[in-house]
Image (cartoon, grey):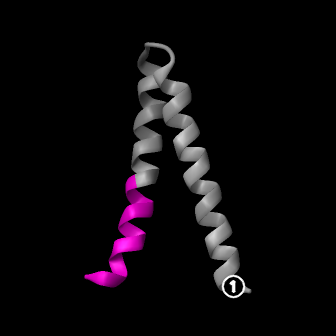
Amino acid sequence: MKSSLIVILKIVIFISCLSLIIIGQKTVGKLELGMMLLGLAGLLGLLYNYNRKYV
């Protein structure tokens, strides 16, 4: 139960970070740049969390 909840949470975070990047890429401005950086930081955090057990 707990592991399936964590997987669902990671999928939701992945989709939201990816949508931040896609929405921010459509226009130019400081707010959109911040959105893209926040999405990138989220994706890097998920990647770090995945690779943490292999190091």
Q: Residue at x 49, y 14 (%)?
A: 27
Q: Nearer the viewer, residue 47 or 33?
A: 47
Q: Is residue 6 above or below residue 27?
A: below
In what quadrant of the picture does the C terminus appear?
bottom left
Question: To which residue does mark 1 refer?
Answer: 2
**Secondary structure found at label 1:** helix
First to last magenta residue range: 44-55
- Residue 51: within the magenta? yes
Q: Main secondary structure of the magenta part?
A: helix
Q: Is residue 52 above or below residue 26?
A: below
Q: Residue at x 41, y 26 (%)?
A: 33
In what quadrant of the picture does the N terminus appear?
bottom right
Q: Is residue 16 above or below residue 20?
A: below
Side of 3 relative to 51 (left or right): right
Q: Residue at x 46, y 52 (%)?
A: 42
Q: Residue at x 40, y 48 (%)?
A: 41
- Residue 19: within the magenta? no
Q: Quadrant of residue 23?
A: top right
Report x, y in % for residue 34: 44, 30
Instruction: Name the residue type under label 1.
Output: Lys
Q: Residue furthest top?
A: 28
Q: Is residue 21 above or below residue 47?
A: above
Q: Residue furthest bottom?
A: 1
Report x, y in % for residue 21: 49, 34
Report x, y in % for residue 26: 51, 18
Q: How many residues crowd mark 1 within 10 Å: few (<14), some (14–19), many (20+)?
A: few
Side of 41 relative to 35 (left or right): left
